[in-house]
Image (cartoon, helix red, strand yellow):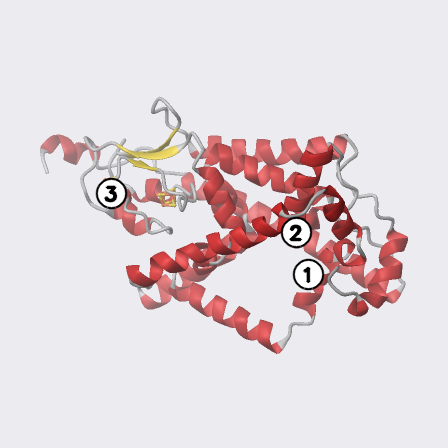
Amino acid sequence: MDAQRKVLIRRTPPDESQMVRRTVQGLFFVLNLWIGAQFYFFVRGVETGSGGWTRPAGVEGWLPIAGMMNTKYFLLTGEVPGVHPAAMFLFAAFLGMSLLLRKAFCGWLCPVGAVSEQLWKLGRDTFGRNFSPPRWIDVPLRGLKYLLFGFFAYAVAGMDAADLRAFLHSPYGVLADVKMLDFFRHLSVTAAIVLTVLVAASVFVRNFWCRYLCPYGALMGIASLLSPLRIRRNAERCIDCAKCARACPAKLPVDTLARVRSAECLGCMECVAACPAEGALAMAAPGGREVRPWVMAAAIAAVFLGVVGFAMVSGYWEGTVPEAVYRRLIPIMAELGHP
Ligand code: SF4
Ligand code: SF4
């Protein structure tokens, strides 16, 4: 290493990307906890007859398939759907984020991604490392999430506007969020075993669920290929230490690439934070202009708040299903089959 390169090694000022990202991640996690608690008390209020809580439309962010269906319904008819419209707006916001800011939804917002990240960091701190399945297993396993996404996309693609409306307006479609809550409230033995295996695997393998199984992440990854942002490495300043590749939760070979174009890149900037060489690695916009972490955070907030704010102000955020329908359907939910 020559003298000039040594001078470049100390980074000033210290990288703040992970502090900014974790703050955004933490705030979104708390928002989801609050929405989850509100929804739980709303359902309990209906079940016990005590009432007192309003159903938070934000819970529909956990209904990505309803989001896909409603987006297609809107594109076919020009009508904002009356059942789970917030699912459509949130789907559009997260997809828009990926188109602009790589998989920023996965790396900066998703609560499942946040938990997953804490689990593999716990594993790394406990065992001194995470484990990587060999490439011949890793590559086909990564394809699973695209297969799962393909299955859902195929099912939605085969539905016309009438089918979509019939599904979403059926009692099953209306109660999709309550059914999801019940999945966790009354966890079956099989589901408990599957969740335990996923949690255990996430401790050993970085982002196990996101890397191999999440169909939503697969869609975000495909959309992120169109994002104008890229992690860029300046080979002139790089000292070939490979710290970026070791830090990358997606296990991308950042140290050997000039630009990271992969659909697996979360836009998390862990690689940038790990890089010790001044100016060697950055999130960059077209033309090579560096995108600072707070600019990423501001852009994520602008897309999210812009879309949700528009839906609220225009009166489309809340669905048209009256509370009386929930009061009628929730007590007979166990009898409702798939339409
Ligand atoms: S390349 Fe960098 S930004 Fe992309 S996933 Fe890896 S660490 Fe995160
Ligand atoms: S870009 Fe990667 S390999 Fe190059 S100096 Fe930075 S961390 Fe080391």
The amino acid at mark 1 is: Met
Q: Give the label on residue 63, or none.
A: 2
Work out which quarter of the rendered image holds the C terminus and state it: bottom right
Foreground of the two, 153 or 256: 153
Q: Position of residue 275 (x, y in %)?
A: 28, 41
Residue contact between numbered discs 2 and 1, judged by CB atoms under 8 Å: yes
The amino acid at mark 3 is: Asp
Q: On screen, 333 above or below 87?
A: below
Q: Is residue 37 left or right of residue 153?
A: right
Q: Position of residue 309 (x, y in %)?
A: 69, 33
Query: Which callout, 3 or 2, points at the residue further toward the start of the chain?
Result: 2
Query: Which callout, 3 or 1, points at the residue further toward the start of the chain?
Result: 1
Q: Is residue 260 left or right of residue 45?
A: left
Query: Which callout, 2 or 1, points at the residue further toward the start of the chain?
Result: 2
Local secondary structure at mark 3: helix
The amino acid at mark 2 is: Leu
Q: Give the label on residue 180, or none.
A: 1
- How many C-alpha atoms fall within 10 Å of the one at disc 2: few (<14), some, or many (≥20)? some
Is the CB–ligand 2 distance for label 3 below 8 Å? yes
